Structures are given as C-alpha cells and as structure tokens.
Image (cartoon, rainbow, N blue to C red):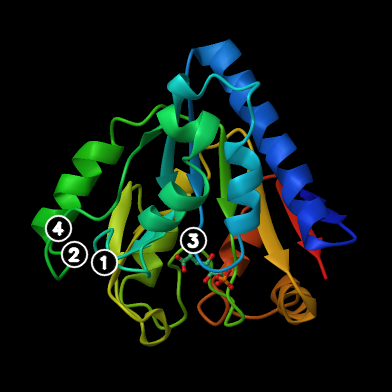
Amino acid sequence: MTIDRRTFADRPTLAKELAEAIADRIRTAIAERGEAAIAVSGGSTPGRFFQALGKFRGVDWTKVVVTPVDERWVDETSDRSNALLVNEKMLQGPAAVARFVPLYSGGDEPTPEAVAKTNALVGALPKPFAAVILGMGTDGHTASFFPGGDTLDAALTAEGPTLAIHAPGAGEPRITFTLPRLLETDGLYLHIEGEEKAEVLEKALGDGPVDEMPIRAVLRSGAPLSVYWSP
Ligand SMILES: O=C(O)[C@H](O)[C@@H](O)[C@H](O)[C@H](O)COP(=O)(O)O
C-alpha cells in the first residue's frame, strides 16, 4: 500500500508532527539541491500547522519558496485569499524571509492571459517540490479539483503547471496546480481533521468514479501518500 495513515491524539500534536516532517523535507531538499519549494493548501485546517512550521529555526528560510496548491481568484486583501493565510500564519518570525510565489495574478477572472502570467511565474519554481500538503473538502475535493469543475479532467491530467477552474462548490473562480505537477514532489501529504473527514476518506478509498470524489485521483495515483489525521 502506498498510503501511510497516521493518527494523532489531537490537532496541536498533529500540527507539530506535520511541521517536523515538512521541516525535514525542506532541510533535505536544501542539502541535496540548494533550495526547497513547498506547496500548501488553504482553507480552515492548516493554520495551526502553518504557525508551527514557520517557527522552525533550524531551517534556512532564505532558501525556501512557498506557493499555494490552489487559490481563490481574489487579491490578498480578501479573507478568502490563501496567500493572505500563508503570509499571516506561516511567513512570520524565522520564516518571514522565505519567498512566496502567488497564483493570483490580478483582475476579476482567471483569464487565459492571467493564467499564462501565473504559469510563467510558477514555471520557474524549483522541481521537484520538497513537499506538497493537500487538504480535503467534505465533497471529496482536494486542491481545486472540485466535483463538477469545468476543467476537472484537464486539472487531473494536464502538465499545467496551473489552470483555471470554476465549480458550483468552489465559491469564487479558482486557479490550481494540476495533479501531474503536484505529484512531482519528494513528499506528498494529506492533512485532514475530524470524524466527518475520516468518513469521507473511507468512502473515497472505496470504489466509485473520480469525478464524484476527485481526491480519488490522488489516492489512486500510486504516489506514496502520508495521511495525517486527528479527531
Ligand atoms: O483553498 C482551498 O480551499 C483548498 O486548498 C482546499 O482544497 C482545501 O484544502 C479544502 O477545501 C479543505 O478545506 P478546509 O480545511 O476548510 O476544510
């Protein structure tokens, strides 16, 4: 089985352990390649983990690049912005000197021109990622791979590196790294909390179509995946 499931007693413990695992990935990538890029999820789950990771002093943060796995098409003044979340929670203290690469590139819509601008920026990121940390919604989405997404098939198969996606459950238009680009990583993690998400994961691990629960594309990719869960 390529899926390694880790259960923690509570959310603060999970945040600390996940931060240690990611800090290790960052240090290893810097030792091997001179720099480390990590891609992180937004939403309500990762705040505590971001705070724990950003406090690490044993990491040379000047050699670290952070980017979101996906972004709502809003600027950094919006409380829906993943960039804002990362900046406020992670890129403080020791981690404040890390470089942040945003996916939002301006305007009201992720037009082809805007996405091309983002792709030019993220195309220059170090490869592979040192770590990619995914979240999961209770509808079975991950990154912005939403059920009913207008570009879902391409998001799961195209090289990208990013593309625009609109979906009924997404709120704003979104931009997301494609799955093939996210799988170019030293370490792939899924961070989920609470009983409801444990049940959603069980269902996703069962049979059923990918477009119903797009997280299945990750679970069935064959890529080694560490699932971090706590009640
Ligand atoms: O920006 C985002 O919305 C995401 O990156 C998304 O894929 C997130 O990880 C899940 O929606 C889980 O979100 P919660 O942590 O809020 O449940």
Q: Are marks 4 and 3 in contact (CB under 8 Å)?
A: no
C-alpha span from label 1 to label 4: 8 Å
**Mark 2 or mark 1, which has the lower sequence index?**
1
Query: Element under label 2?
Result: loop
Label located before the other in sequence (4 or 3) = 3
Residue bearing mark 2: 110
> Distance from label 2 to label 4 (Cα)?
8 Å
Q: Please state which amino acid type lies under the numbered disc 3.
A: Gly
Q: Which residue is mark 1?
A: 73
Secondary structure found at label 1: loop
Foreground of the two, 223 or 71: 71
Between 96 and 122, the residue placed more toward the observer is 96
| Numbered disc in front, either 3 or 2 | 3
Q: Which residue is mark 3?
A: 42
Q: Is residue 30 left or right of residue 17?
A: left
Real-space Cα separation, disc 3 to disc 1, in angstroms = 13 Å
User: Which residue is denoted by mark 4 in the rendering?
Assistant: 106
**Picture quarter with the C terminus:** bottom right
